[in-house]
Image: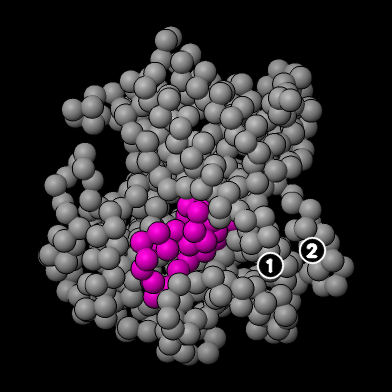
Amino acid sequence: MENIVIKTEVPGPKSREIAQKREKYVASTLDSLAPFYIAKGEGAVIEDVDGNKFLDFTGGWGCLVVGYSPKTVVDAVKEQVENYIHTDFTATPYEPYAELAKMIVEKTPGNFEKQVIFLNSGAEAVENAVKIARGATRRKGVIVFDKAFHGRTLLTMTMTHRAMPYKYNFGTASDVYRLPSPNPHRNKYTPHDFERLLLDTAYPEDVAAVVIEPVQGEGGFNVPPQEFIEEIRRVTEKYGILFVADEVQSGYGRTGKFFAIENWGVAPDLITLGKSIAAGFPLSAVVGNKKYFDALPKGSIGSTFGGNPVACAAGIEVIKMIDEQKLLDRAIQLGKIIRKRFDEMQKKYPVIKEIRGIGAMCAIEFIKDREKWEPDPDTCGKVIQESLKNGLLLAGAGLHKNIIRLLVPLVITEEQLNEGLDVLDRAIETVTKA
């Protein structure tokens, strides 16, 4: 049975009616991929207000590891809402906050005591991880890497690499230093050069944290070598710098491990979480070594809505779903299907020059000239639009916008996955033969 069903032109009449309100009242800086408006979603399928059905491989930009509207999450949220919707945990504490913190700590690598603080967004988690590192070390410097994405607040926007549209002319924060990542197509930098580059860039006794995405999200699912992550851990321990893993996009099972960093067998000092942590409710977290939280004054880290009880109730059910439905194993299986299909596409379409990722976190890169490794954002953008026209939502990525990344929910069926990949295959064929 086909999951994609197009009944009207897209956008349909009801979507166009809503679009008129948007044009008049919603800030014009917001730019949506889909031209239609969602009415409901289930698993990997969304239905718009005109009754058209689409497969969503963006997962709300990576927020829906357990898919749209899983029943156990919906039931838990309803029960929580009927009891109480909100109070600040620092005013009147509640059990869902403590229970979810316990469940996350039990998943977190590292042979040391750990604690959790909940916040609202991925950017807020990263910003607070830096605050914790600075407070605990009494240093200010932050080391980040090229192609990184860490958020859109003033600090995390500075930590993010791409200038447009994220930085524009909004200004930057101080004490942020960017280093290259090993890239076989762009540099001859090896993992063992990391310490030298760090020392060439900043005085290590001034550096509070090295922040890295184990698998880059917006940067294009770049996977660092084993030796690189190990070297970062060695160097940070040597100089008393905190190793912070930004798992806002890569965490919660996408790579086949609960935390992507587990693929390298390394335990960071702090890990940031967001996006899929609560099935789409605004929730994020910093989890890490208890001693770094203990080093801070009471009340120095917090958030009015961080750890909202409804979001925490959803978060508890997300972890239960991951465990009970064996979604970590599922990510590996989905990844095998995606890799096989991507390999077939690469053989057919010379414009696809690289496939990369771990588990279900897979991407393809479009390149014009293999020798120069010249990006091809034009083909990539056309493929995304052609796929959208035929019922599949895809997420772009990369500093040069020439990468398609898959952020499929881990509850997607194989039938749905293959149907979506068929649409992508035909879209590449259509665009490259035009």
Tags 1 and 2 touching, CB below 8 Å:
yes
Q: Residue at x 61, y 78 (%)?
A: 102
**Residue 350 to residue 184: above or below:** above
Tell me if residue 289 is in the magenta stretch: no
Q: Secondary structure at mark 1?
A: helix
Q: Residue at x 38, y 25 (%)?
A: 346
Q: Please name the residue that numbered disc 2 is placed on.
A: 76
- Residue 322 lies left or right of residue 253; in this view the side is right
- Residue 267 percent across, percent down from the top left: 39, 72
Look at the magenta stretch and give its main secondary structure: loop
Q: Please name the residue that numbered disc 1 is placed on.
A: 316
- Residue 12 percent across, percent down from the top left: 73, 23
- Residue 55 percent across, percent down from the top left: 64, 33
- Residue 216 lies left or right of residue 384; in this view the side is left
Residue 90 visible in the snapshot: yes
Q: Amino acid at mark 1?
A: Ile
For the record, the magenta segment spans: 249-276
Tell me if residue 261 is in the magenta stretch: yes
- Residue 427 lies left or right of residue 14; in this view the side is left
CA gap, disc 1 to disc 2?
9 Å
